[in-house]
Amino acid sequence: MSERTILVVLDGLNHAVAQHAMGYLHALCEADRATYHTLECELPAMSRPLYECLLTGDRPVDSGVVNNDVVRRSTGTSLFDLAVAQGRRTAAAAYHWVSELYVEAPFDRVRHRLRQDRDAAIQAGLFYWRDHYPDDHLFSDAEALRQLHEPDFMLVHSMNIDDAGHRYGADSAGYRNAARQADIALADYLPLWMAAGYQILVTADHGMNDDRSHSGKLVEERRVPLWTLGSAFVEQSVTGIEQTEICGTLATLMGLEHTKPVAHALLAAGAAT
């Protein structure tokens, strides 16, 4: 098995809103073209620690990236690192903290905004630094990278839902509508990525609470959605998935050698061979 994969991270989207606001993604589920699952994020339920968790499989207490103020390159082995070391192409359209974790810290808006370096962990990158950078621009950035560089693994990371949650709280029209807008924007690009044969995961790093925050153990902070799209995934919802298993699951689909934990329950028969 040597699949190409895309990981979409909808920052700050909790399960409760994901259940009802993402009309296009759930339409794919009803048409048997996607499957919806849930998982609980690791703690603390904060962005930078959980980017690291999703992309290395390491819990924050193990990675040392335990809050958003830990500004340094990751010391773990990320999916980007695994892919490049084994001759695969990587790309990311993402918030600048991803650049700091896997390219260089601190982020320089001029030098690091646009990256193209065959020797870097993220070989092709478009990075932004405003939390309200429009999601439809971000998904367009990702598609441009895909067309230009044909990556084997691409990260697509949007911030508008999280930004709205911090402004208005989880129980607000602003937060729910930000989720709806992200879903609408994804409807323009997911069909292209599926037609190109990518295996796709759409998830969130953490959720959001009514206090316009997140970091703790509340269900609305920890429970997040996970959609799987592609023939390599099972067609029924499964439980017990760990956030630490996302990196290894994608690495397995890509045929990479690794020792990361894997969510085998997500994989269709034969997908890991």
Image (spheres, rainbow, N blue to C red):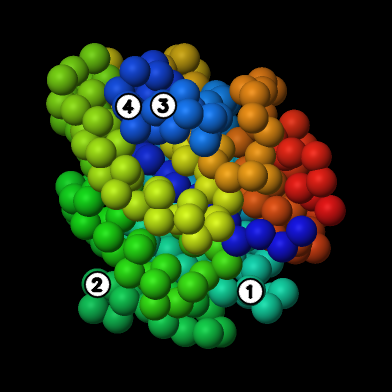
Mark 3 residue type: His
The reply to whether callout 2 and callout 3 are in contact (CB within 8 Å) is no
The reply to whether callout 3 and callout 4 are in contact (CB within 8 Å) is yes
Mark 4 residue type: Gly
Circle on res. 109: 2
Q: Is residue 207 visible?
A: no
User: Where the N terminus falls, by quadrant?
Assistant: bottom right
- Along the polypeptide, which appears first: circle 2 or circle 1? 1
Residue found at x 31% / y 76%: 114
Mark 1 neighbour class, 10 Å CA radius: few under 14, some 14 to 19, many 20 or more: some
Q: Please tell me whether mark 3 sits on a helix, a strand or a loop.
A: helix
The reply to whether callout 3 and callout 1 are in contact (CB within 8 Å) is no
Circle on res. 23: 4
Q: Position of residue 190 (x, y in %)?
A: 40, 48
Q: Position of residue 72 (x, y in %)?
A: 47, 63
The reply to whether callout 2 and callout 1 are in contact (CB within 8 Å) is no
- Along the polypeptide, which appears first: circle 2 or circle 3? 3
* In-image side of 112 versus 129 (left or right): right
The reply to whether callout 4 and callout 1 are in contact (CB within 8 Å) is no
Mark 2 residue type: Arg
In the rendered image, which residue does mark 3 sit on?
Answer: 26
